[in-house]
Image (cartoon, grey):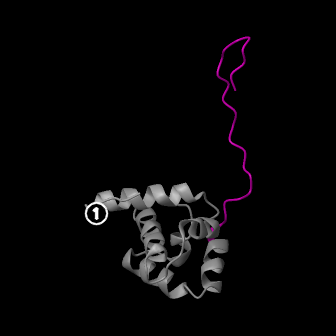
Amino acid sequence: MVTKKTMKVVMKPAEDDGIRKTAGEVLEGLLARNLGGVVEEVAAEFHCTPLEVCGTSRQVPIPDARVELWSRLYSKEIGWSLPRIAEVYGLDHSTIIWQLKARKKRLGKRVKP
């Protein structure tokens, strides 16, 4: 926060608004929508568990597996919207957009907004 008196920047700790979901909640949400098979396929490809793919870990290769899952959910075959994917994970849709763009760049594909 910047005050006019001091013109100092005071950093506030981020507040947990309770929106982000646990790995178990995300997995339950995907299973309820009959997408357990997709989660299991991605987990097997990246040698991790379905619960890890639905979690928040940044340990390699889990983030890549999570973005691959998002990519498959967004694909024409499943056809989920970015806000719908974000809702299941308890994230903002811009996070999903950013990660999918970064994935395309890593794979050398043309990036569209």
Q: Residue at x 56, y 70 (%)?
A: 54
Q: Residue at x 68, y 25 (%)?
A: 10
Q: Secondary structure at mark 1?
A: helix
Name the main secondary structure of what is drawn in magenta: loop
Q: Which residues are magenta?
A: 1-23
From this viewpoint, which residue is outermost toward the top? 5
Magenta residue check for 27 = no
Q: Image quadrant of residue 76? A: bottom left
Q: Is residue 59 visible?
A: no
Vertical arrangement, residue 99 with respect to residue 31, above or below: above
Vertical arrangement, residue 84 with respect to residue 8, above or below: below
Vertical arrangement, residue 70 with respect to residue 17, above or below: below
Rendered location of residue 28, percent (x, y): 65, 79
Vertical arrangement, residue 90 with respect to residue 14, above or below: below
Q: Image quadrant of residue 86? A: bottom right
Question: In which quadrant of the rendered image does the C terminus lie?
Answer: bottom left
For disc 1, the neighbor class at 10 Å (few under 14, some 14 to 19, many from 20) is few
Which three-letter amino acid code belongs to the residue tagged 1?
A: Leu
Rendered location of residue 107, percent (x, y): 28, 63
- Between 102 and 59, the one nearer to me in the picture: 102
Rendered location of residue 39, percent (x, y): 50, 80
Location of mark 1 (residue):
107
Magenta residue check for 17 = yes
Asked if residue 95 lies left or right of residue 18, the reply is left
Q: Residue at x 36, y 59 (%)?
A: 112
Question: In which quadrant of the rendered image does the N terminus lie?
Answer: top right
